[in-house]
Image: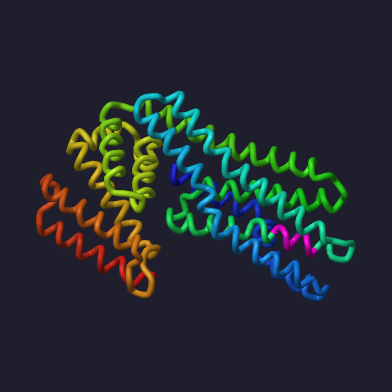
């Protein structure tokens, strides 16, 4: 599944080159044009509301996360249908919020437009609307090592919606028509995510017993460790559910040849090692706070593998030393 998401992101990049160009140069182009026209008030307003929305955006998205967590908890308790329904509701929250935000920005800035300024104002409003989302999408992709496909897809549909909206407004179509375009395209985004989520959930229900045991232990570890473990947890879970690297049969054989505990803790070590040595968690020769947390997870996991007689004490110490040498100084 992880490979699919990387290909998905690559495909999006390939087919959205005009959007990428607009994202990179649009704001600069509109800024110069508006400055020449003397529209300093709109320039200031744009920076201000984009900055404010960028700060509050993670906080106003929290209800979506809470709804999703509630749904997942219900699924873990065996209430799969009801839990899936509740979790699916979370996919509507952020797109609806973004539609309202984009329509507001478009209406606000277009109100001050005239025949001479309509083009730079529309482009400026596009940059103001999507700027915060682009920032958080980039941040999430960095934290999840390029696996934040859901945010990337939402940003894609939002960008396409806004570009169409700009053309519609330029040619005099009503805000109701523009809202309909936003709603339709973002609904496609929501449907894709719900279908993916349901396939993810239903597949978990019919897994072999050995993999179910592995998932149970993984869920327990995730609840104990905390938020910095989330992307490690998701990578291993995707591997178990969607056979990202090897077949389900081979996973079962691996578990039977060792144990559920050794299999899961070995995978945790691998994923943490891959994350820390990627350079995403170090800055000028020092690990970030999240990197330090992951290093502690690695050390504890290696100690557990030693207690399980999976590795010797010497091998455990060598692994701890190696990850420190390879992870620090990469940022």
Give me the residue at 27% from left, 39% from top: 220
Question: Furthest-right residue in view?
Answer: 115
Q: Nearer the viewer, residue 44 or 232?
A: 44
Dividing the picture into quadrants, the one containing residue 97 is top right
- Whether residue 17 is visible here, answered yes or no, is no
Q: Nearer the viewer, residue 209 or 188?
A: 188
Tell whether 142 sits left or right of 319.
Answer: right
Give me the residue at 70% from left, 47% from top: 161
- Whether residue 284 is visible here, answered yes or no, is yes
In the image, residue 121 lies in the stretch drawn in magenta: yes
Residue 192, percent from left and from top: 57, 36
Give me the residue at 66% from left, 50% from top: 101
Residue 15, percent from left and from top: 65, 51
In the image, residue 42 lies in the stretch drawn in magenta: no
Q: Is 180 placed above or below 111 here?
A: above
Q: Main secondary structure of the magenta part?
A: helix
Quarter in which the C terminus is drawn: bottom left
Residue 252, percent from left and from top: 27, 32
Dividing the picture into quadrants, the one containing residue 237 is top left
Give me the residue at 36% from left, 67% from top: 282
Total labels drawn: 0
Quarter in which the N terminus is drawn: top left
Q: Is 88 placed above or below 34 here?
A: above
What coloring was used for the rendering? Answer: rainbow
Q: What is the magenta range?
A: 120-126
Residue 6, percent from left and from top: 49, 49
């Amino acid at each position: 599944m992880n490979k699919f998401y990387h290909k998905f992101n690559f495909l999006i990049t390939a087919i959205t080159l005009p959007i990428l160009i607009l994202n990179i140069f649009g704001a600069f182009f509109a800024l110069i044009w508006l400055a020449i026209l003397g529209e300093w008030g709109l320039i200031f307003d744009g920076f201000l509301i984009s900055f404010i929305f960028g700060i509050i955006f993670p906080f106003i998205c929290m209800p979506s996360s809470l709804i999703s967590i509630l749904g997942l908890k219900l699924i873990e308790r065996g209430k799969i249908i009801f839990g899936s329904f509740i979790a699916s509701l979370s996919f509507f929250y952020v797109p609806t919020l973004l539609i309202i935000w984009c329509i507001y920005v478009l209406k606000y800035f277009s109100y001050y437009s005239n025949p001479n300024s309509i083009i730079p104002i529309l482009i400026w409003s596009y940059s103001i609307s999507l700027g915060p989302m682009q920032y958080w999408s980039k941040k999430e992709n960095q934290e999840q090592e390029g696996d934040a496909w859901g945010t990337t897809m939402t940003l894609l549909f939002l960008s396409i919606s806004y570009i169409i909206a700009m053309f519609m407004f330029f040619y005099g179509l009503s805000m109701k028509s523009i809202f309909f375009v936003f709603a339709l395209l973002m609904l496609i985004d929501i449907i894709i995510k719900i279908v993916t989520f349901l396939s993810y959930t239903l597949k978990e229900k019919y897994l072999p017993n050995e993999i179910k045991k592995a998932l149970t232990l993984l869920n327990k570890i995730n609840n104990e460790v905390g938020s910095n473990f989330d992307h490690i947890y998701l990578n291993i879970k995707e591997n178990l559910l969607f056979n990202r690297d090897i077949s389900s049969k081979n996973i079962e054989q691996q578990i039977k040849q060792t144990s559920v505990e050794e299999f899961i803790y070995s995978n945790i070590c691998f994923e943490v090692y891959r994350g820390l040595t990627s350079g995403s968690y170090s800055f000028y020769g020092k690990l970030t706070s999240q990197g330090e947390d992951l290093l502690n997870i690695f050390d504890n996991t290696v100690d557990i593998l030693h207690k399980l007689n999976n590795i010797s004490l010497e091998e455990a110490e060598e692994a701890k030393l190696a990850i420190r040498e390879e992870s620090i100084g990469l940022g």
